[in-house]
Amino acid sequence: MHTKLIMSSSSLLVTFLSLLLLHSSPLVISQSAPVFSPIDKDDSTGLYTITIYLKTLLQPSKLHLDVGSFLPWYDCARHYKSSTYQPVIYNSSLCLDLDTKAYGNCFRPPAPGCSNDTCMFFPENPVTRKIATGLLLTDKFALPIAQKQFQLGKVSQIVLSCTDPNKYSRIYRGLAKGSTGLASLGRFNYSLSAQISRSSSSPWIFALCLPSSSKAPGIALFNSPGPYNFSPGIDISRSLTYTPLILGPRSADTQIFYWYKSPDYYIGLTSFKVSQRLVSLNQTLLAIDENGMGGTKLSSSAPYTVLQTSIFNALKDAFVKESVRYNLTEVKPVAPFGLCYAADKIQSTRLGPAVPTINLVLHNSQVVWSIYGSNSMVNVPNNGVDTLCLGFVDGGLNTRTSIVIGGYQMKDTLLQFDLVRDRLGFSSSLLVQSTNCANFSF
Ligand SMILES: *[C@@H]1O[C@H](CO)[C@@H](O)[C@H](O)[C@H]1NC(C)=O
Ligand SMILES: *[C@@H]1O[C@H](CO)[C@@H](O)[C@H](O)[C@H]1NC(C)=O
Ligand SMILES: *[C@@H]1O[C@H](CO)[C@@H](O)[C@H](O)[C@H]1NC(C)=O
Ligand SMILES: *[C@@H]1O[C@H](CO)[C@@H](O)[C@H](O)[C@H]1NC(C)=O
Ligand SMILES: *[C@@H]1O[C@H](CO)[C@@H](O)[C@H](O)[C@H]1NC(C)=O
């Protein structure tokens, strides 16, 4: 009887909300209209969150942004009140399609994330690679419409995994501060980006623009091949460069889901060019082997690009040689970086500190992602002396992935993930076009 009461009062509220939405929208908006989330930067980790609307009533929910990863997951134990959640029963077509090969029971009172004969998934922290267990549920979700900014789009069903409350600190530690779950945007049929596109029958294409500061958010656009309008009146989709996305045979980082293909976005980096100096790299390390080791991928869960030792040393040596022409004074490096300069001697330009440009040469020598000072040099406080460090990190000799392109190198750059044509579109620094990721025009 108690349950019935809650149900009926919630459906009243739902009706009320839909009326509100109806009245505020005289225009009929196509179901596939692009939707968006702001991307916020967390200064304590240098990582990012997005916000989606979840449950009934729809509530904004902050999730750690990871461009790889399989299924979204959420803290159902601490943050869940909803009248529309449903456990995903083992043997249901959804569970079979997800192919998680696991199910679980729960011996506490029934609650979100606690039910019997339920499809199970192993949430994985993309920063620490710690793993928990979790039961699956479905519920309602929505995102605001990009042309409207303050109006939510179609309300659809999402499937996500709940994190076990006993493993709370283990699974959330290291994520962007304030995250109540994971926004997995990976190459997986039930990643958040795949679910958003499928729910509105849109092509699986999304774009990310990571902000450079915690003060003004960037933007994630879903269901959108472009235009991407930024003030002052520039459509960034017209100036993108493309490189194929390479499908990893299996995820190098995940030990459990060995039967899935990799959810990571790999690209075919072949060399670096520092100014005009070509840096040749060990091609064996740049290829992905049958176990998913090696290669170059993008990760928003790494604050700085991480390089295998031999690649790091090659880049560093070339940078040092080229910086002779820039009058730079090397100082003792500050961890985690390996090359730092006194900041006072470095001129600043509209593309950041004046240092040699690092070009990422992709599948052919004409296709180049340029990294200028604003994306290569990190200001590090060092005993009161202003220091600028090369924002690349030595990941050791035995990295699983040889090059992991991190957030600092991707900020103020528009990245389009096109899973229809299996390609990545990139803008290089938006500062070149006198705009940045906080300048999206709604
Ligand atoms: C699951 O089944 C067990 C055994 O029948 C029962 O004790 C338990 O309360 C059930 N759990 C839930 C969440 O319904
Ligand atoms: C799933 O279905 C199979 C075959 O019908 C059955 O043997 C099994 O007990 C079912 N599992 C659960 C958890 O219901
Ligand atoms: C993913 O979904 C698409 C469309 O529903 C389907 O054709 C494809 O087989 C699915 N892939 C996997 C690996 O399940
Ligand atoms: C390139 O890397 C592979 C894999 O780590 C290694 O076995 C090989 O010796 C390296 N080649 C050179 C020329 O350093
Ligand atoms: C390099 O530094 C010297 C001495 O501080 C200065 O005279 C010179 O103009 C600088 N050159 C450049 C290219 O900045």
Image: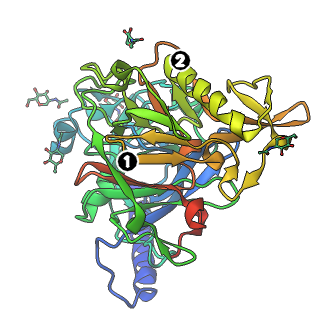
| Residue neighbourhood size for the residue with mark 2, other residues' Cα within 10 Å, grouped as few (<14), some (14–19), many (≥20) | some
> What residue would you read off at disc 2?
309
Position of 351 relative to 228 (above/below):
above
In the rendered structure, the answer to whether residue 362 lies left or right of residue 422 reads: right
Residue drawn at x 41%, y 64% is 239
In the rendered structure, the answer to whether residue 108 lies left or right of residue 438 reads: left
Please tell me whether mark 2 sits on a helix, a strand or a loop: helix
> Is 363 in front, or is 184?
363
The numbered mark at residue 367 is: 1
Residue drawn at x 20%, y 44% is 94
Report if residue 19 is visible in the image: yes
Residue placed furthest toward the right: 384
Residue drawn at x 59%, y 68% is 439
**Residue type, mark 1 in image:** Val
Total labels: the figure holds: 2
**Residue type, mark 2 in image:** Thr
